[in-house]
Image (spheres, grey):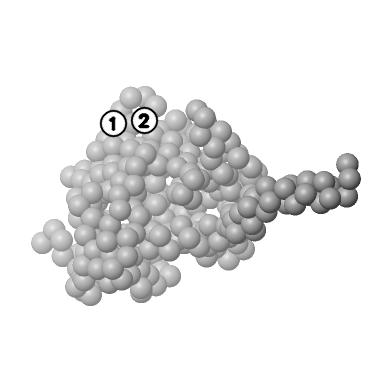
Amino acid sequence: MNPRALVSACALVLALLLPAVAGAADAKPPPSPDEILRLIDKRMSMASDYKGVVRIREIRKDGVERAIEMHVYRRDSAQNFLMLITQPRNLAGGGYLRIGGNLWEYSASTGQWVRTTRRANIVGTIACEGDFDRSRLAEDYTAKDDGVETIRGTPFRKLLLTAKESAEVSFPLLRLWLDADNNIVKRVGYAPSGRTLRTDVVRSYQRLKDPATGESVYHYREVLELEEEEGTQIIVRYEDVQLAPLDTNIFTKTWLEGRLR
């Protein structure tokens, strides 16, 4: 090839390659694991007060079923949380109250308050307080990439989360499966030994507009939770969600004690 032809050939190759190189330079790298945790927390946090109804259908391995209903009130800005049990009838009027970092369980039948933790199960189910509280993944865990799993032709990015030393969490180890928009579609909680404790499948989300910010927020609509050891499963539905100011008196022991009067 003569010199002029060689220059022309090189120019043609560069012309073909430059758009691809420019496109690669413009492409944003995927968010890091810790960035994803912060994104999920932000997307699922409400600046407005929160009120909703949680309906649980519990199915034990022996086939026994139980229906549970709870009203949940949250003020995420102050970390206040109250849960009022309305079903089953023998537990109605009881509930849970958290003010700041302190969490109590109230029994309406005895009128007693007992200090509890976020790790404890709620209403004797496999669910825990953290399932109904705001998302705080970035506060409680560090994360690292755990590969990609393709299910029925769809790839899901996986993250492996390890609880921070001071975090009060139900699962010391947590694995997340994320869709292309970084929404959690599945999560598995593990003991420190790596033994599987619980598997959750997020069946659907609901999108809400937060009046305080004008922005959209995501909230679970239905989650299937499966306990590994006993084989118990619960279907959790989040219904009648409202984002509006709540009376400050709701987040008090007196308010919960007065529900059955």
The residue depicted at 39 percent of the width and 34 percent of the height is: 233
The residue depicted at 84 percent of the width and 47 percent of the height is: 6
Numbered disc total: 2
* 173 horizontally vs 106: left or right: right
Q: Quadrant of the N terminus?
A: top right
Numbered tag placed on residue 37 in the rendering: none
The residue depicted at 10 percent of the width and 61 percent of the height is: 261
Q: Secondary structure at mark 1?
A: strand
Q: Position of residue 175 (x, y in %)?
A: 56, 45
Looking at the image, the residue that sits furthest to the left is 261
Q: Residues within 10 Å of mark 2 (few under 14, many from 20)?
A: some
The answer to whether residue 38 is seen in the rendering is: yes
Q: Position of residue 120 (x, y in %)?
A: 43, 52
Amino acid type, label 2: Arg
Q: Secondary structure at mark 2?
A: loop
Amino acid type, label 1: Glu
The residue depicted at 46 percent of the width and 57 percent of the height is: 40
The answer to whether residue 133 is seen in the rendering is: no
Q: Position of residue 12 (x, y in %)?
A: 72, 48
Which quadrant of the structure image shows residue 112?
bottom left
* 113 horizontally vs 180: left or right: left
Residue carrying label 1:
65
- Marks 1 and 2: CB-CB under 8 Å? yes
Q: Nearer the viewer, residue 69 or 178?
A: 178
Residue carrying label 2:
60
Looking at the image, the residue that sits furthest to the right is 2
Q: Residues within 10 Å of mark 1 (few under 14, many from 20)?
A: few
